């Protein structure tokens, strides 16, 4: 069996969940694609996957075919220029998005017309990243026994965040699944306001959370990606990684998607309600408040 020590693996898989919002401009995308090229060329077995998500859906933008990641694990090389591929998929996503009104000649002009009040589908993007990491598990054969050894993977969530209260249960389930697979989720928020849900994701999976102001994105983002996101877990253990402060784990009710301090938990699916309903919103089981003697 192959060792699961991070030092025993040459390279790792990085899944980038990129939020498509009004903050995404051409310089932003060029910096990310430059990082992706350097990351792929730094080690022969480094692999990267980019998942785009907006308020409508989440889709894999790079590589063109997920199976190429598995082939790259055996061949030791995978490289396609990410910029043209990601920008083409970004244009397809915007063309299918109902929140973009009117045809505009530029992809980034369409991005700036996205409504700011919509809730991005972070849960879908995380689920896709976790499934891709699980699919890229290495099959190591020892005599007649086949053993699946996880590829050392990491997820990077990149974007300004938003209102994820309606996806609270799905996002937390994804974070627990990533933790079980030993996949760290790093979160870089490029919005003006803090993103509590991204802080929780990083804290649960032992990743890092970093907030970069919109004005400093062009100067700080390339440095952050190169220093913190391009290195493997063993190398990063010697670095001064940003530590999360006091993380607030205030949950959101499934009935109104609002943060609450005190709620009622379903005994079957553990969903949190702000009031005692006749039946659970998630699993539809009939709920009865126990009588106090």
Image: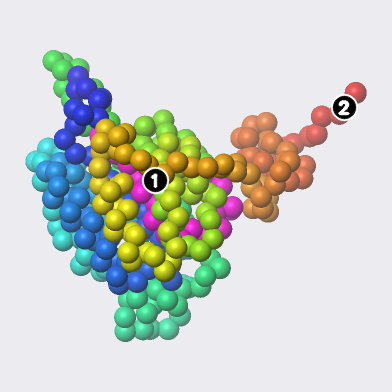
* Location of mark 1 (residue): 186
**Foreground residue among 210 and 36:** 210
Q: Is residue 149 left or right of residue 221?
A: left
Q: Does any portion of residue 104 appear in the rendered image? A: yes
Question: 139 or 82, which lies in front?
Answer: 82
Q: Which badge, 2 or 1, is on the more N-terminal residue?
A: 1
- For the residues labelled 2 and 1, the Cα–Cα distance comes to 45 Å
- Kindly report which numbered mark, 2 or 1, lies closer to the viewer in this rendering: 1
Q: Tag 2's secondary structure?
A: loop
Identity of the residue drawn at 61% across and 35% down? 269
Q: Is residue 157 above or below residue 172?
A: below
Label 2: which residue?
Answer: 292
Q: Give the range drawn in magenta.
A: 151-171
Q: Exactly how many numbered labels are in the figure? A: 2
Residue pictured at 48% horizontal, 42% vertical: 244
| Residue 137 in view (yes/no) | no
Where's residue 39, x and y in %?
Answer: 20, 50
Q: In this view, does 166 lie to the left or right of 150?
A: right
């Amino acid at each position: 069996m192959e060792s699961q020590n991070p030092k025993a693996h040459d390279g790792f898989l990085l899944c980038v969940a990129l939020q498509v919002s009004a903050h995404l401009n051409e310089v932003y995308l060029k910096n990310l694609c430059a990082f992706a090229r350097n990351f792929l060329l730094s080690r022969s077995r480094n692999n990267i996957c980019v998942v785009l998500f907006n308020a409508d859906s989440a889709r894999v933008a790079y590589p063109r075919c997920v199976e190429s990641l598995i082939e790259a694990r055996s061949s030791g090389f995978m490289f396609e220029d990410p910029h043209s591929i990601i920008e083409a998929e970004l244009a397809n996503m915007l063309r299918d998005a109902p929140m973009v009104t009117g045809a505009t000649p530029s992809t980034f002009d369409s991005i700036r017309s996205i409504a700011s009040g919509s809730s991005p589908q972070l849960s879908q993007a995380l689920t896709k990243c976790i499934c891709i990491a699980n699919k890229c598990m290495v099959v190591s054969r020892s005599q007649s026994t086949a053993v699946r050894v996880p590829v050392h993977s990491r997820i990077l969530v990149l974007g300004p965040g938003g209102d994820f209260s309606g996806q609270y249960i799905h996002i937390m389930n994804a974070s627990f699944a990533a933790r079980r697979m030993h996949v760290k989720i790093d979160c870089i928020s490029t919005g003006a306001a803090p993103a509590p849900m991204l802080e929780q994701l990083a804290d649960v999976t032992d990743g890092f959370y970093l907030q970069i102001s919109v004005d400093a994105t062009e100067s700080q983002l390339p440095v952050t990606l190169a220093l913190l996101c391009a290195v493997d877990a063993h190398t990063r253990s010697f670095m001064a990684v940003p530590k999360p402060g006091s993380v607030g784990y205030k949950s959101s009710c499934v009935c109104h998607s609002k943060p609450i301090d005190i709620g009622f938990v379903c005994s079957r699916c553990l969903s949190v309600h702000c009031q005692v309903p006749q039946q659970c919103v998630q699993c539809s089981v009939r709920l009865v408040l126990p009588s106090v003697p």
